[in-house]
Image: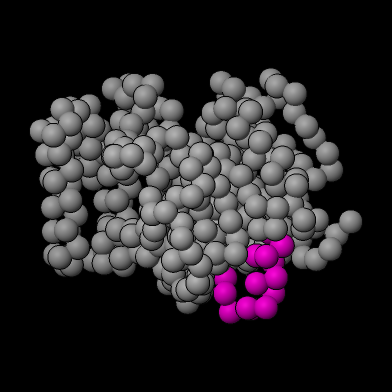
């Protein structure tokens, strides 16, 4: 039974079927009932249909022929949500669990605040729920750098006040469906990483407002983060996409006359390169940075096809 505006929850499956199914079950347990769940299967190696897949009239399963990345997979789901006439679209990583009241709270807030276009929830670590993963973020319009708020901090209520933000993470994003009609879909040239920065930039350029809303809660299974030493190195593919797409962002939005922006990018690049090489002895990450830089300059975007990246990096290309 429908109890309000239709919400489409888009989940892109990549990786572990059991993890995706747990995410789906958490959405199904929502107290808000006007839901469509759109699952885009982006993992040819480990399809959902290879395991018992719980289908009912709230779930639509779309099988992609290949891994089209975070951008392509979500775009398929967003287009389907628009076809079904959804008023809201929620993008959700498949390694998340949502609070039963999250969607109901988001809809109530959006219906009461017609000038807000996007909500970013409070995201906590699943395995250590007393710690914050992300409590909103801010985008530096001059460099494209993102500052995430509250990362690794113990949740003691210090981020329980809603506020305006300039960056909404794609891990869990609740938006009016018309946002994607006005600013467009994710840029599939990015494939993965940096796509939420690009989307946030376009939302801001369109004059729309985004809000951090802590009454909406999500738990994220970010297994690569070690909260003890707070050090987590990315894989090679992640490193490649991050630096390739950062330069793409600069070239798309920042004038070449903006020397400060390019200077800060160069400094960050050299600092990270030196750290990988000298501190961590990870020459594979150095090579990934260089390859990403060269490909961005050459305009080689989309999915990375370089064979130099190993499985450790490939695991996180969702």
- Please state the horizontal and vertical placement of residue 266, each as a whole percent of the image: 14, 52
Q: Where does residue 287 sit, x and y in percent of width and height? A: 20, 30
Tell whether 131 sits left or right of 301: right
Along the viewing direction, whichever of 157 and 133 lies nearer the viewer: 157
The image quarter containing residue 11 is: top right
- Residue under the image location 75 percent in, 23 percent down: 52
* Residue 108 visible at all: yes
Q: How many marks?
A: 0
Split into 4 quadrants, where in the image is the N terminus? bottom right
Residue 97 vs residue 157, the one in the foreground: 157
Residue 45 in picture, x, y percent from top left:
56, 21
Q: Position of residue 87 (x, y in %)?
A: 71, 64
Q: What residue appears at the point 54 percent right and 28 percent down from the top-left corner?
A: 15
Q: Residue at x 77, y 56 (%)?
A: 31
Vertical position of residue 189 compared to residue 150: above or below: above
Magenta segment, which residues?
103-117
């Amino acid at each position: 039974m429908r109890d309000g505006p239709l919400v489409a929850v888009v989940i892109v499956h990549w990786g572990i079927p059991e993890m995706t199914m747990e995410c789906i079950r958490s959405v199904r347990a929502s107290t808000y009932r006007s839901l469509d769940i759109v699952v885009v299967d982006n993992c040819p190696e480990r399809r959902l249909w290879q395991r018992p897949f719980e289908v009912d009239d709230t779930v639509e399963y779309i099988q992609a022929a290949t891994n089209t990345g975070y951008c392509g997979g979500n775009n398929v789901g967003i287009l389907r949500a628009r076809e079904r006439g959804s008023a809201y679209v929620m993008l959700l990583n498949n390694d998340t669990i949502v609070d039963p009241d999250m969607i109901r709270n988001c809809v109530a807030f959006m219906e009461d605040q017609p000038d807000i276009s996007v909500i970013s929830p409070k995201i906590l670590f699943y395995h250590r729920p007393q710690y914050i993963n992300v409590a909103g973020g801010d985008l530096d319009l001059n460099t494209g750098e993102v500052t995430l708020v509250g990362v690794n901090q113990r949740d003691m209520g210090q981020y329980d006040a809603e506020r305006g933000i300039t960056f909404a993470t794609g891990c869990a994003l609740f938006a009016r469906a018309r946002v994607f009609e006005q600013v467009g879909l994710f840029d599939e040239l990015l494939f993965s990483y940096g796509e939420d920065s690009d989307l946030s930039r376009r939302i801001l350029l369109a004059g729309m407002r985004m809000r951090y809303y802590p009454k909406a809660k999500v738990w994220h299974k970010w297994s690569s983060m070690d909260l003890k030493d707070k050090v987590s190195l990315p894989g090679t593919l992640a490193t490649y996409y991050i630096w390739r797409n950062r330069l793409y962002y600069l070239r798309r939005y920042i004038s070449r006359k903006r020397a400060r922006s390019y200077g800060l990018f160069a400094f960050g690049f050299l600092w990270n390169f030196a750290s990988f090489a000298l501190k961590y002895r990870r020459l594979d990450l150095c090579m990934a940075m260089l390859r990403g830089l060269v490909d961005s300059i050459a305009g080689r975007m989309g999915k990375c096809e370089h064979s130099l990246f190993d499985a450790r990096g490939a695991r996180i290309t969702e």
